[in-house]
Amino acid sequence: HGRGCRARASATHATHDMQYNFKKIATVPTATDFIDVVLSRTQRQTPTVVHAGYAITRIRQFYMRKVKYTQTSWNEKLSRILEDFPRVDDVHPFYSDLLNVLYDKDHYKLALGQLNTARNMIDKIAKDYVKLLKYGDSLYRCKQLKRAALGRMCTIMKKHAASLAYLEQVRQHMSRLPSIDPNTRSILVCGYPNVGKSSFMNKVTRADVEVQPYAFTTKSIYVGHTDYKYLRWQVLDTPGILDRPLDERNTIEMQSITALAHLRAVVLYIVDISEQCGFTIAQQATLFHSIKPLFANKP
């Protein structure tokens, strides 16, 4: 019992860590590539010669092995895809907002569900055909059964070509998300362009400011780290995201902004009193009030 609990605890812990590693998801092959890979692997990894003169039990074994091997290959590869992709409910709201802009949650769940069904159907086909092969009475009969089994497995995968293609798109998109840890203490630096946000960043953070691409904007997020009173902080500068009034935004930009509201962050609004940045103090105050509602419950 204790072991079960421990295993579960470590499993939940693993899903928690997994959230931020979208870059580790392996490429999802197209249906045709997938079929080629699996079939050629069966070809390579199982014996290739069988004669009509062999004892019938040996002939049956030969073909059963091919069916089982093909099924295990599919199973492993599909399971890998299903494990790699994060479950919708495990993803931090910051990321699920960013993903939701381009990809609908339900469609994503559906695609993963279809692959799961495909995996179960392939397992069932293999089981059924291995049963039939046990009673194959000639080499010709056994070979036909093997061809039928592999053919049906491939047909199932062809039917799921769209789901595979869709998941590959989602994967490419996920790998471009900024790697920010939404659960760390963060400081969000905002203000108009040229008010000294970057200078502030460079002063407080050790010179390890990384530039992370930010969803669907040509904008990037600058991520730096600093220690204050022995605590590690993540400092985020968001050029082009929080530096102009919200009513000038299109929906996509709006969603990438609201995603920021999910971070556990302190918002630091920088004002340039000298007005050398090209914006009057009045304008700077207006911007402050326009983005304030986003961070209602944040210091």
Image: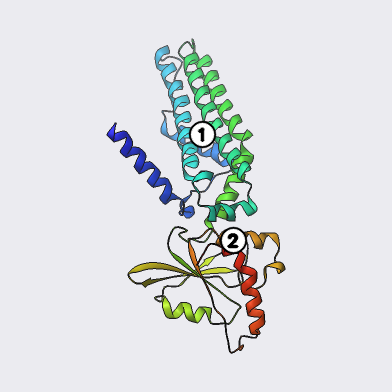
Q: Does any portion of residue 285 appear in the rendered image?
A: yes
The amino acid marked with disc number 1 is Leu
Q: Is 272 left, or right, of 180 in this rendering?
A: right
Find disc 1 in the rendering and name its residue.
Answer: 39
Query: How far across and down, in percent of the image, does residue 173 sit?
Result: 58, 55
Q: Residue at x 63, y 84 (%)?
A: 281
Q: Residue at x 50, y 37 (%)?
A: 78
Depth check: 99 or 182 in front?
A: 182
Query: How far across and down, in percent of the image, does residue 107 sit?
Result: 63, 42
Q: Does any portion of residue 32 appear in the rendered image?
A: no
Q: Which numbered circle lies on residue 174?
A: none
Q: Residue at x 53, y 68 (%)?
A: 221
Q: Is 133 left, or right, of 159 in this rendering?
A: left
Depth check: 86 or 246 in front?
A: 246
Name the quadrant containing residue 261.
bottom right
In the depicted structure, whether residue 190 falls above or below residue 273: above
Q: Residues within 10 Å of mark 2 (few under 14, many from 20)?
A: many
Between the C-alphas of marks 2 and 1, the distance is: 38 Å
In the depicted structure, whether residue 199 falls above or below residue 43: below
Query: How far across and down, in percent of the image, does residue 203 sit?
Result: 43, 81
Query: How far across and down, in percent of the image, does residue 162 sit?
Result: 64, 40
The amino acid marked with disc number 2 is Ala
Per the image, label 1 sits on a secondary structure element best described as helix
Q: Mark 2 or mark 1: name the one nearer the start of the chain.
A: 1
Find disc 2 in the rendering and name its residue.
Answer: 215
Quadrant housing the N terminus: top left
Dot 2 and dot 1 residues touching (CB under 8 Å): no
Depth check: 262 or 65 in front?
A: 262
Marker count (numbered): 2
Name the quadrant containing residue 47.
top left
